[in-house]
Image: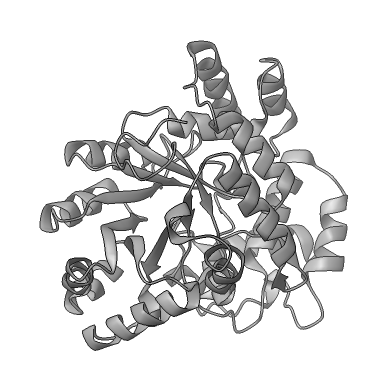
Amino acid sequence: MEKNKFFPEINGNFGFGCMRLPMNGEKVDYDAFSKMIDAFIDAGFNYFDTAHGYIGGQSETAIADCLSKRYSRDKFLLTNKLTDPYFNKQEDIRPFFENQLKWCNVVYFDFYLMHAQDRNNYEKFKRCKAYETAYKLKEEGLIKHLGISFHDKAVVLDKILTEHPEVEVVQIQFNYVDYEDDSVESRKVYEVCEKHNKPVLVMEPVKGGSLVNLPEKADQILRDLKGGSNASYAIRFAASFPKMAVVLSGMSDMVQMEDNISSMKEFKPLDEKEMEAIRGVCDIFKSMDLIPCTSCRYCIEENECPMSIRIPDMFSALNAHESFHSWTTKVHYNNDLIGNGHGKASDCIGCGMCETVCPQHLEIRDLLTKVAATFDK
C-alpha cells in the first residue's frame, strides 16, 4: 500500500470514521468493533477519526479499550476534535483536551480539528482563542497536525483559512449528491481548499448511508456497471479528486468494513464510464424531494430534544417512504420510532434547539411537519 501523498505517516487514503460503530443495544459492541479494527489494520490502513460527542462519548472510550490498549501507538493515527458545547472560555480548552487524551488512552493526537466550523461557532472559537490554544498544544507535541472540520458555505471557509493559514488540513462533507448542491456547496468548498493549498479529509462520502440504499432506478444504473457496491462507487468518487488526503467511512459492521477495504486497498479513481453512471444517479436524486439528512445525530445528542423526538430516524423513514413507497415505513414509524418516551413528529414544540447544531442547516421544524403530515394522520 502506498504512503499518503500529503501525510507520509498515513497508510493509503482511507480512514475509519468512529461516529457510527457496531452497537449492542445502547452500548458499543466491543467485540465487533475490535474485530473491525483488526481487519482494518491487517489490511494496512491506520487512520482513525473520533470526537467527544460521537455516541454520547462512547466513541472515545471504545477507541481506548478496542484500539489504543490493544495496539502500540505506532500502529495507528488518531484524530480528535474540539467541539463547541464542551467549552465556554479559553481556560476550558486545555482541561477538556487533556480529558480527551485520557478517554482515548493516548498521550498525543496525530490530528486535532476545530470541529464543525461555521459562521456562527467560528466567532466563539475566535473569542475563546481556540486556534491559538490548539497551536500551543501542537508546539508542546500534544498535537501533530492542526486542522478544522467544516459545515458551511465556501465564502466562510475562505475567511477562516485566510485568517488562520496555520491550519494544515480541512475536513469537509463531500459526496456526489452534494457536489453541486447549493445548500452544501461541496464543489465550491473543495475549490477553496485547492485555493489555499490545503489537503482534504472527506466525511459523509456515502451521505449517512443514503448512497448505499438507492432508489430502484438509481440502483440499477450502478448495477449495470457490473462492478463494485454502491458504497464503493461513492467512496471512490470522493477519493478521485487530487486534494483528497483521506476519505472516511463510518462503518458499523464487518460486511461494510470488508466491502470498503476491497475497494480502497488498491484504490483506482473512477473512470469516465463510472462517472457518467454517477451523473445519472445524481439526476434521479435531483428529481426527488428528499431530506438531505446525514444521520449525524447532532440534533439529538448535542442538544437533547425536549420531546425526545427521533429526528434523524424520522427523516430516514420519510425518505424511504418517498423513495420506495413502501407501507412498511409507516409500520416502522409507529412501532419503532414513537412511544416508550419518544415523541411523534407532531409533538414538536418548535424550540429550534435542533436547528442550532445541524451541520446541514436543515429547517428541521418545518421538515417535522412534513413527517407528521405523512405518518401522524
In the displayed structure image, the side of residue 290 where residue 90 appears, left or right: left
Residue at left offset 63%, top offset 66%: 311
Looking at the picture, does residue 247 appear above or below residue 357?
above
**In terms of image quadrants, where is residue 138?**
bottom left
Q: Nearer the viewer, residue 3 or 316?
A: 3
- Residue 115 appearing in the image: no
Q: Nearer the viewer, residue 247 or 289?
A: 247
Number of on-image labels = 0
Q: Where is residue 53 in the image (x, y as percent from the top left)?
A: 50, 72
**In terms of image quadrants, where is residue 301?**
bottom right
Q: Nearer the viewer, residue 114 or 159?
A: 114
Image coloring type: one colour
Q: Position of residue 160 (x, y in %)?
A: 19, 57
In the displayed structure image, the side of residue 37 where residue 72 appears, left or right: left
Residue at left offset 44%, top offset 60%: 73
Q: Quadrant of the C terminus?
A: bottom right
Looking at the picture, does residue 275 appear above or below residue 348?
above
Q: Where is residue 346 in the image (x, y as percent from the top left)?
A: 69, 72
In the displayed structure image, the side of residue 306 where residue 268 appears, left or right: left
In the displayed structure image, the side of residue 250 where residue 255 appears, left or right: right
Q: Position of residue 228 (x, y in %)?
A: 66, 24
- Residue 273 appearing in the image: yes
Residue at left offset 64%, top offset 60%: 21
